[in-house]
């Protein structure tokens, strides 16, 4: 069997495409968690982003309005979470779970009228360059702007956290909100901002699914990707670059196991479907074994409410 | 340049407690001021008001005649008031430099230069690029001080700065503070340690129950007069009688090792010691040198090799805490609210947690509440716990009362050995006295104690033999009479 080298390029590109929503949502959640907030509502925020993007695209016809509208929807729903956990000091875990249930429910309700409507084609960049380089051409060129953004995001996030003052403040708040508050940092404001940013990224991840990856609305179309994104953050030990690796492994195995099922490999389907989850977690656990680094990158105050007393 | 700080009629009321009751004080630069008081006297509230962490209900603060509005820590910083908190305000996982740059507006390079200059001037040596959690307590404090000095403060407030320091680190700190004072920084030193006040300060203000009791010059005071002002009554001094030397061995530790998987815990290396009946073995050391691991190994929270611990002629190294209690061992861990008691549970429920087979607290899996309550009432009256409500949640007990309850719970079964870890940490003088008396009484009844403590004075007062733990290793065991606090300090620092 002769395999066209460009065909391999296409497979790699499709793996990368399937990793995009995971990277976006994970990198957003990473910032939220680095500030000490555990938002388990990623799945809910993603699906809200997916329906908002698709609905706005259908109604207004504008892709730009749709993309930014989806991010805004993510921001709005995460504002609920921020208000509850930061202002009313509710429990992060319970509130996040409620957010997911709420998101899935409300997206299904809004989505009723959009089932079966075909999506629009999303413009891709550098389409013409695709055939200029073998193998690399299909990998590098002919993707949407969101795709390129997603692959830049882990590096931007890493730079932001390590090199900028605001990144330092986010890490400080996650390390010790009490100390941060005593240093005159407005802990609640920082955490609000990080939650809202996480919401925007989850919204964008959802919009990518419903507008670019599979341009249509299907109820519950995020299919647990929000939970995977959450797991990636933890198993990558809050390291954006490892999120990228984890998302690629997960995306890769998802695509490969589809192909294996199609070819008819004699392995139970259930095992194949479970494979991406198992392997991703094993790989991330293995590459993140340095307990010293874990201690240094784990936000000490993660999931704990901070209440300033006066 | 003279600095004058005036606190005028400051009042802060919390539900059920007046933390500061109309306090007025005046400070001038060139002197070191002590603010002295027991826990809960209101000194911490007062300095938190000065540093903008707490906003007072009434009263004003003037710096060089200007009325300051201190609504946040930022306001205090802007007004040149620097504060080093008792519990460090550092970010453990960030590097030293990141900790310092976070509240500074300066560029990286110029800040680095400034820090270097400060470190040279005061002989500090700290690696700026390692995370805070790798520093010793003394180094962490220096980082806090540098953070204040970067801003050229007019006022520097130190809140109980020596509670985590060794003798050497304390004298280094005092030298630095004197130097700062000579350079015109007004220093306010908060403490409940009288010796330090006498050593360091020029003037002393004493607080009790939220009120200012007295302001005086150090040269007119002595330790006894200050102690009496602080407590408000005459304290009797307790002293341990020399124990009869017994050669009846109760517990023997042989070649005990513990290797932790957590890199931030300390490994225990070749621990060997024995304690005779009626003896108190004190284990000194700077916190974080393996004390908590040693306590856990001795109490059975960490299981070790069966033969490494011999108690009353039984090998018990592989038993858990409850099984060890059946052999008449008792434990009082360091953290009262985290380890010794469950804060949200009622007093009698906490008593029941210490459950022996012989105690009959449970019948066929059901709780025998009457029995437990009876038992709890006995503890409360025998051990002077200041409450009569055994339904009270233990988090509402003061530290002293909770410690009495815990020690009482452990002792009411008259164990042969009590292992306690910093039993008087953070308690006021009255409660400390009571706990010390109780511990001495145990020894007099021919029972033994292993006292792990970071308080050298306490160890010298209570121990018959003393050893020092440093980086997980025990020094040789010395007779308490032959030991001085200076000698302990040297061993605690790691010298031989």
Image (tube, coloured by chain):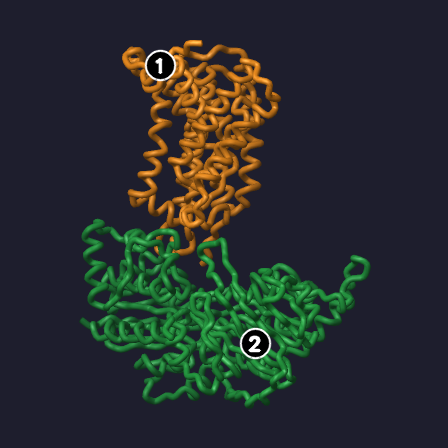
Chain colours: A orange, B green
**Res B319 visible:** yes
Discs 1, 2 touching: Cβ within 8 Å = no
Instruction: Residue lying at the far right in this picture: please name it.
Output: B364
| Residue in the picture at 20% in, 65% down | B120
| Residue in the picture at 58% in, 80% down | B439
Image disc number at residue B480: none
What is the number of callouts on the image?
2
Q: Quadrant of the C terminus of chain B?
A: bottom left
Q: Nearer the viewer, residue A189 or B56?
A: A189
Figure check: B398 above or below A58? below
Figure check: A109 above or below A308? above
Residue position marked by numbered label 2 in the rendering: B274
- On the image, the x and y values in percent for residue A288 come to 44, 41
Q: Residues within 10 Å of mark 2 (few under 14, many from 20)?
A: some
Q: Quadrant of residue B124?
A: bottom left
Q: Residues within 10 Å of mark 1 (few under 14, many from 20)?
A: few
Task: Using the image, name the chain to which the residue with label 2 belongs.
Answer: B
| Residue in the picture at 61% in, 61% down | B342
Q: What kind of element bears circle 1?
A: loop
Task: Using the image, name the chain to which the residue with label 1 belongs.
Answer: A
Q: Nearer the viewer, residue B153 or B476?
A: B476
Residue position marked by numbered label 1 in the rendering: A123
Q: What kind of element bears circle 2?
A: strand
């Amino acid at each position: 069997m002769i395999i066209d080298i460009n065909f391999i390029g296409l497979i790699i590109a499709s793996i990368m495409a399937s990793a995009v929503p995971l990277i976006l949502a994970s990198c957003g959640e990473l910032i939220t968690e680095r500030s000490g907030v555990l938002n388990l509502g990623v799945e809910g925020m993603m699906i809200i982003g997916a329906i908002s993007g698709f609905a706005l695209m259908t109604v207004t016809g504008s892709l730009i309005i749709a993309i930014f509208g989806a991010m805004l929807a993510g921001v709005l729903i995460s504002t609920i979470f921020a208000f509850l956990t930061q202002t009313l000091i509710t429990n992060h875990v319970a509130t996040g779970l409620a957010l997911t249930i709420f998101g899935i429910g409300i997206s299904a309700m809004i989505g009723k009228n959009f089932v079966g409507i075909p999506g629009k084609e999303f413009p891709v960049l550098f389409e013409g360059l695709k055939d200029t380089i073998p193998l690399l051409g299909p990998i590098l060129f002919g993707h949407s702007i969101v795709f390129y953004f997603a692959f830049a995001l882990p590096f931007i996030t890493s730079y932001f956290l390590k090199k900028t003052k605001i990144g330092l403040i986010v890490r400080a708040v996650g390390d010790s909100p009490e100390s941060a508050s005593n240093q005159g940092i407005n802990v609640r404001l920082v955490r609000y901002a990080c939650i809202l940013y996480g919401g925007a990224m989850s919204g964008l991840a959802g919009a990518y699914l419903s507008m670019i990856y599979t341009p249509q609305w299907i109820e519950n179309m995020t299919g647990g990707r929000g939970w995977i994104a959450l797991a990636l953050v933890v198993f990558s030990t809050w390291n954006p670059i490892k999120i990228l690796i984890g998302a690629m492994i997960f995306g890769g195995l998802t695509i490969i196991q589809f192909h294996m099922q199609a070819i008819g490999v004699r392995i139970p389907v259930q095992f194949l479907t479970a494979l991406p989850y198992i392997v991703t977690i094993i790989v991330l656990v293995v590459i993140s074994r340095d307990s010293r680094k874990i201690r240094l990158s784990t936000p000490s105050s993660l999931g704990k409410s901070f209440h300033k007393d006066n | 340049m003279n600095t004058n700080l005036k606190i005028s009629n400051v009042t802060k009321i919390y539900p059920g407690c007046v933390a500061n009751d109309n306090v007025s004080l005046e400070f001038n630069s060139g002197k070191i001021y002590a603010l002295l008081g027991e826990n809960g006297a209101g000194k911490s509230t007062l300095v938190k008001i000065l540093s903008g962490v707490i906003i007072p209900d009434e009263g004003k603060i003037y710096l060089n005649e200007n009325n300051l509005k201190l609504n946040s820590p930022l306001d205090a910083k802007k007004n040149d008031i620097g504060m080093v908190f008792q519990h460090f305000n550092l970010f453990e996982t960030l590097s030293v430099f990141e900790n310092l740059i976070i509240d500074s507006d300066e560029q990286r390079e110029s800040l680095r230069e400034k820090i270097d200059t400060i470190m040279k001037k005061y002989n500090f040596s700290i690696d700026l690029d390692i995370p805070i959690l790798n520093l010793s307590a003394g180094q962490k404090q220096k980082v806090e001080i540098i953070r204040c000095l970067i801003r050229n403060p007019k006022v520097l407030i130190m809140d109980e700065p020596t509670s985590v320091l060794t003798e050497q680190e304390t004298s280094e700190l005092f030298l630095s503070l004197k130097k700062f004072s000579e350079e015109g920084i007004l220093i306010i030193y908060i403490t409940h340690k009288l010796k330090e006040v006498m050593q360091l300060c020029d003037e002393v203000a004493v607080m009790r129950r939220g009120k200012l009791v007295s302001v005086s010059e150090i040269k007119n005071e002595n330790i006894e007069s200050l102690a009496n002002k602080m407590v408000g009554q005459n304290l009797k001094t307790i002293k341990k009688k020399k124990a009869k030397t017994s050669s009846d061995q109760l517990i023997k530790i042989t070649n005990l090792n513990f290797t932790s998987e957590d890199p931030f815990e300390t490994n225990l290396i070749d621990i060997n010691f024995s304690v005779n009946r009626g003896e108190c073995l004190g284990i000194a050391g700077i916190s974080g040198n393996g004390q908590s691991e040693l306590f856990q190994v001795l109490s059975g929270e960490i299981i070790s090799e069966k033969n490494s611990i011999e108690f009353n002629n039984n090998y018990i190294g592989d038993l858990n805490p409850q099984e060890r209690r059946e052999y008449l061992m008792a434990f009082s861990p360091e953290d009262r609210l985290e380890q010794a008691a469950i804060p949200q549970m009622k007093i009698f429920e906490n008593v029941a947690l210490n459950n022996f087979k012989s105690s009959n607290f449970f019948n066929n899996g059901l709780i025998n509440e009457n029995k437990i309550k009876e038992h709890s009432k006995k503890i409360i009256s025998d051990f002077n716990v200041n409450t009569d409500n055994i339904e009270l949640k233990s988090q509402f007990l003061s530290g002293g009362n909770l410690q009495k309850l815990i020690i009482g719970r452990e002792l009411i079964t008259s164990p042969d050995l009590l292992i306690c870890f910093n039993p008087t940490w953070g308690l006021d003088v009255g409660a400390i006295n009571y706990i010390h008396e109780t511990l001495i009484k145990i020894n007099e009844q021919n029972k033994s104690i292993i006292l792990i403590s970071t308080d050298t004075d306490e160890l010298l007062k209570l121990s018959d033999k003393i050893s020092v733990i440093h980086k997980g290793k025990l020094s040789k065991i010395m007779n308490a009479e032959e030991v001085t606090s200076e000698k302990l300090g040297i061993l605690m620092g790691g010298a031989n």
